[in-house]
Amino acid sequence: MKFTRFLVLLLAMFGMHCASDSPTSSNSGPDNPDNPNPPESYSHTERTGSAAVDFLSDTDFTSLTLEVDYVDGFKPTPQAISALQQFLEAHLNKPDGITINLDEPIPSSGKDTLTVQDVVGMENQYRSTFTDGTDLGVYMIITDGIYTKENVLGFAYYNTSVAIMEERIRQISGGFGEPSTSVVEESVIKHELGHLLGLVNNGTPAIADHHDEEHGAHCTNEECLMYYAVQSAGFMSNLLGSSAPGLDDNCIQDLKANGGK
C-alpha cells in the first residue's frame, strides 16, 4: 500500500530516530544542569514516555500548550501543523483545549551537524512554555543542520520535548519523484509525538501483543504510524500523492486505556 511504502521511506531509508533508540532516553534525560525550568515546577527533563498519562488524561492537566520554535528559514508547513492539531485533539482528553503556538523564528546554531546536546542547548535558550497549573507545557524545536546520524529526521528526547530535523526533511522531499514536504513533516512530527504519548509500550502499556521489542518502542503493524519499517524495493514510484499513515487500532486502544480517547 502507498503509505506503507512511504513509511518505509521515512523510517528505513532515511532513518527516523525515535525515543526508544535515542542516546538520551534514559531515566533522567540528558545531563542538563542549566535547564530553565522554574523552581518547584513540573519536571520537563524526565524520560521520554514517562508523562504519557499527563498527555492523555484530564486527571491532572485539562489543557495543553505546545510551543513550536523554528530556525529562521525552516518554518514548518501549515498543513503539518494543522494535521498535528487534529492528531492531538483526536487522542488527548483536554477539555480546556489544545493550543499550538508557532513562535517567531530563532537564529541558527551555526552548526552544520547537531548533537542531542546542541538541541538541548537551544531548548534551554529559547523555550518559554512550561507546565503551569493544569496546563501541560510541551516543546518542539525545528532545526536546520543535520543530526550526527545524517539520516535522522526527528527524535523525542525528554518527557515533553521533540526535535525535528527540517533541513534533512527538505533534502529528501518536495522534488520530482519525492513525497511532499508537508507529508514528511506530518509523519515525522506525529511519530515523535506518539513517543511522548508512551507508544509503544513505553509509558503507555500495550494491551495487545503488538510491541516490536526488537526495534524498541514501535508497533509490529507495518500500516501503523508507529511501525519501524525496513527498506522495501520499488516504493519510490508510489510516493507521489501519498498521505501520512495513522495509528492502528492497537495503538489507539492503548492510548484509550491509558487515559486518552
Image (cartoon, rainbow, N blue to C red):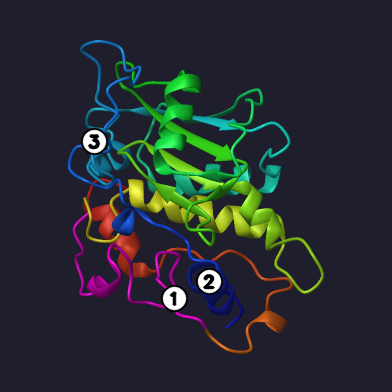
Q: Quick check: 79 above or below 187?
A: above
Give percent across and percent down for residue 37.
32, 17
Type of amino acid at the residue the image marks with label 2: Leu
- Disc 1 crowd rating (10 Å Cα; few below 14, some 14-19, many 20+) is many
Give percent across and percent down for residue 202.
23, 55
Query: Which image quarter: residue 174?
Result: bottom right
**What residue sits right under mark 2 in the picture?**
7
**Residue drawn at the location 23% of the way across and 36% of the way down:** 46
Quadrant where the N terminus lies? bottom right
Q: Does residue 261 appear in the picture of this structure? A: no
From the viewer's perspective, is the residue at label 3 or at label 2 nearer? 3
**What residue sits right under mark 3 in the picture?**
46
**What residue sits right under mark 1 in the picture?**
229
Q: Quick check: 159 above or below 260?
A: above
**Residue drawn at the location 58% of the way across and 54% of the way down:** 186
SS at badge 1: loop
- Disc 2 crowd rating (10 Å Cα; few below 14, some 14-19, many 20+) is many
SS at badge 3: loop
Q: Residue furthest bottom?
A: 233
Type of amino acid at the residue the image marks with label 1: Ala
Q: Overall secondary structure of the magenta stretch?
A: loop
**Residue drawn at the location 39% of the way across and 47% of the way down:** 156
Comparing 177 with 135, the one in front is: 177
Residues under numbered marks 3 and 1 in contact, where contact means CB atoms less than 8 Å apart: no
Q: Does residue 105 appear in the picture of this structure? A: yes
Residues under numbered marks 1 and 2 in contact, where contact means CB atoms less than 8 Å apart: yes
Type of amino acid at the residue the image marks with label 3: Glu
In the shown orientation, is residue 198 left or right of residue 4?
left
The span from disc 3 to disc 2 (Cα, nearest Å) is 28 Å
Give whichever of discs 3 and 1 has the lower sequence position.
3
- Disc 3 crowd rating (10 Å Cα; few below 14, some 14-19, many 20+) is some
Q: Quick check: 90 above or below 39?
A: below
